[in-house]
Image (spheres, rainbow, N blue to C red):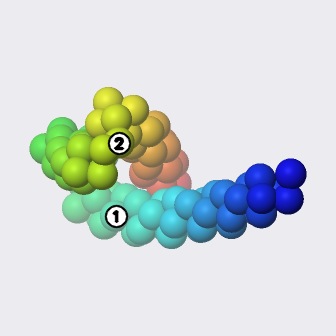
Amino acid sequence: MEEIEKLRSYLDEIDRELLGLLIKRMKIVRRIASIKKRHNMPIIDKKREEEVYANVTRIASKQDLDSYQIKSIFHEILLLSKRIQNEVLEQ
């Protein structure tokens, strides 16, 4: 079906955009880690994590997305962020 292929092509483009945004996010995470390293700050900031979860679940709820699933996606993003920050601290 041509219509499905066209829609899948749009999804592929969105996936590329999402990856691009994740790459940008991780570059910022590296910069934050460098600052934390210079100031002997811990990687984990529970207050900030809770802010991120609150923000994304609020937005998800307003868009009729499953806030539990969105929080789960962002949990993985934050795990990746912490791993990258740990790598920077070990350098």
Residue placed most toward the observer, 29 or 21? 21
Residue 24 falls left or right of residue 6: left
Which residue is at a point 44% across and 39% down the rendered structure image? 73
Q: The residue under label 1 is which amino acid type?
A: Ile
Dot 1 or dot 2, earlier in sequence: 1
Q: Circle 2 — which element?
A: loop
Classed neighbour count for the residue bearing mark 1: other residues with Cα under 10 Å, few (<14), some (14–19), many (≥20): some
Q: Which mark is residue 71?
A: none
- Do the residues bearing badges 1 and 2 touch, measured as CB atoms within 8 Å? no
Horizontally, is 6 left or right of 79 in the view?
right
- Find residue 21 and report its horizontal and vertical position in percent: 52, 66
Question: Residue 32, labelled with which disc?
Answer: 1
Above or below residue 16? Residue 49 is above
Secondary structure under the numbered disc 1 in the rendered image: helix
Q: Is residue 55 left or right of residue 11?
A: left
Q: Is residue 63 visible?
A: yes
In-front residue for pair 57/19: 57
Q: 38 or 53: nearer the eye?
A: 53
Kind of residue indicated by mark 2: Leu
Q: Real-space Cα distance between discs 1 and 2?
A: 30 Å
Mark 1 or 2: the one toward you:
2
Q: Residue 33 placed where, x, y %?
A: 37, 59
Question: How packed is label 2: few (under 14 Cα within 10 Å), some, or many (20 or more)?
Answer: few
Residue at the limit of the structure toward the right, as seen here:
1
Query: What residue is rendered at 29% in x and 36% in y?
Result: 67
User: Looking at the picture, how far across and down is residue 65, in whole percent?
Assistant: 35, 42
Instruction: From the viewer's side, name the closer residue of 46 and 66.
Output: 66
Which residue bears the numbered disc 2? 65
Report if residue 23 is visible in the image. no
Q: Position of residue 12 (x, y in %)?
A: 72, 59
